[in-house]
Amino acid sequence: MVKDQRNRKSSDKNFLIGFTCNSAAAFKLILAALVLLLICTCAVFLQFLPTYFPPFSCATTTTTTGQPSPPPPPKVDQILEHGVVKRWFQPFGSAAYSFILMSAYRGGPNTFSIIGLSSKPLQVYSRPTYSCEYQNSNNNSSSFVKAYKILPDWGFGRVYTVLVINCTFPAGIADDSSVGGRLILHAPATNQRNESLIAIVEPPKSWDVSHFVSPPKYDYLYCGSPLYGTLSPQRMREWIAYHVRLFGAKSHFVIFDSGGIHPEVFEVLKPWMDLGYVSLQDVKEQERFDGYYHNQFLLVNDCLHRYRFDAKWMFFFDVDEYIYVSPKLSLRSVTDSLEEFTQFTIEQVPMSNKLCLTQDSGKTSEKWVMEKLVYRNVKKVARRDRKYAIQPRNVFATGVHLSKNFEGESAHKTEKLIKYFHYHGTIATRQDTCQQFINDTSTTIGDDTPFILETNMRMITPSVKRFELETIGTILQSTRQ
């Protein structure tokens, strides 16, 4: 009996010891979990505290909400000696960015061009200056030069004006392509302090000096204006087919989409893109910055410097305008005869966008603009807008109707060689343009504006249609207005 009691007591004691040990281990585990939970809870809780609360000691790190600190209290007017009232002015926000970089390009072994927008009041009234720095990747050395700036939009800018900045370094500074480097623009800001931005980063062997001296890839390159609005797919179809035929196999067309290349227009361009004739660039982002005519000057200057060494001649005109060369000539013969000039301008032939021939009545929906709009405006005016072409390697900045920043001479008496037909107001209409049918060789309408029959473009149209069919097939035959 006694022995049994002793055994029972010993068993109870062992059980108690085992239970206590197991409970201690479990308790430690629970305690560790509670401490971890408390730390996490503190960390989360701190995120919702105001930034001026001191952090709790249980958190190992602190976080902030990222909200700006409260503004300082406004200054109050003060009365100085002799009764003078001291007034204060408090600036808030910013009226415009001091500089908006679009692009930057190397223009030779030691020269660069930077294209962007700048605050127009800053440029007009402050006349800021710029400098460039080239950092060599090989030894981290830096070289500085004063930049030369060009304002190529003739004062047409709005909130923003176009800025082309040239940075030319002494020989031996930026001409080693094997090491690479980066170009930094130092620009003044509106708050009276300088800001720096990286314009170009050049990895080793990312460029070759032969690019600047080799024969150009294209004979002719078209730099387009920004396209926006509800454009007619059929008008774009006619325009691109006509000009690919005129400019030839060694030509290229750069189209800027500012919102006008909707799916139907894209389907018209796609076959020509596939053949390498067209590059389409989405520049809708520039609409955020209020410049002249959807920042047209910005885009043509970007196109100039982007393709400066890729083309013998660059043309600048709109998609409701058609370059015309007499059938007795060719575009090659025209440009060859003008090769001594850096630039030549092109005279306008203004066409009615309403008058059509009586014989076409009932059939005009099937006809192309250049074959059905056959009446030319011959009203005498002091000056009509011209468009132009340049040899880009001699040009530093450009405009909409001509360039003023180039080396060389301009030719303006070119009307016997080349012209352009202007079908104003036709590219954005989705309906048939013919509104009045006549059967005379001349007429006067509206505000006594005289028109005469002009059929040169009409006679070319059949050959353009054949060219399109032979080049891309029937894929665009069902294109809608």
Image: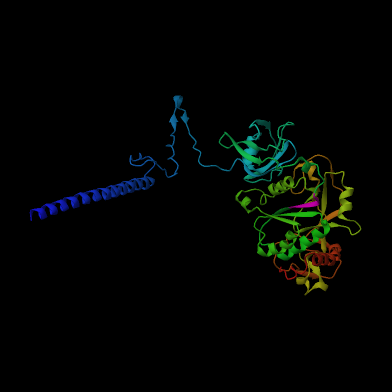
Which quadrant, please, contains the C terminus? bottom right
Report the residue that reaches farthest toward the right: 328
Report the residue that reaches farthest toward the top: 81
Q: Residue at x 73, y 71 (%)?
A: 478
- Residue 122 picture location, percent across and down: 62, 38
- Residue 229 picture location, percent across and down: 66, 59
Report the residue that reaches farthest toward the bottom: 362
- Residue 100 picture location, percent across and down: 62, 43
Dominant SS type (magenta): strand
- Residue 210 picture location, percent across and down: 78, 42
- Is 366 in front, or is 44? 44
Q: Is residue 442 at all visible to an observer of this figure?
A: no
Q: Is residue 339 at all visible to an observer of this figure?
A: yes
Q: Which residues are magenta?
A: 217-223
- Is 473 in front, or is 204? 204
- Is 24 in front, or is 458? 24
Magenta run includes residue 340: no
Residue 463: quarter of image? bottom right
Which quadrant, please, contains the N terminus? bottom left
| 252 in relation to 152, above or below | below
Residue 248: quarter of image? bottom right
Magenta run includes residue 221: yes
Q: Is 41 displayed left or right of 323 in the figure?
A: left
Q: Is 179 displayed left or right of 457 in the figure?
A: left
| 324 in relation to 176, above or below | below
| 357 in relation to 283, above or below | below
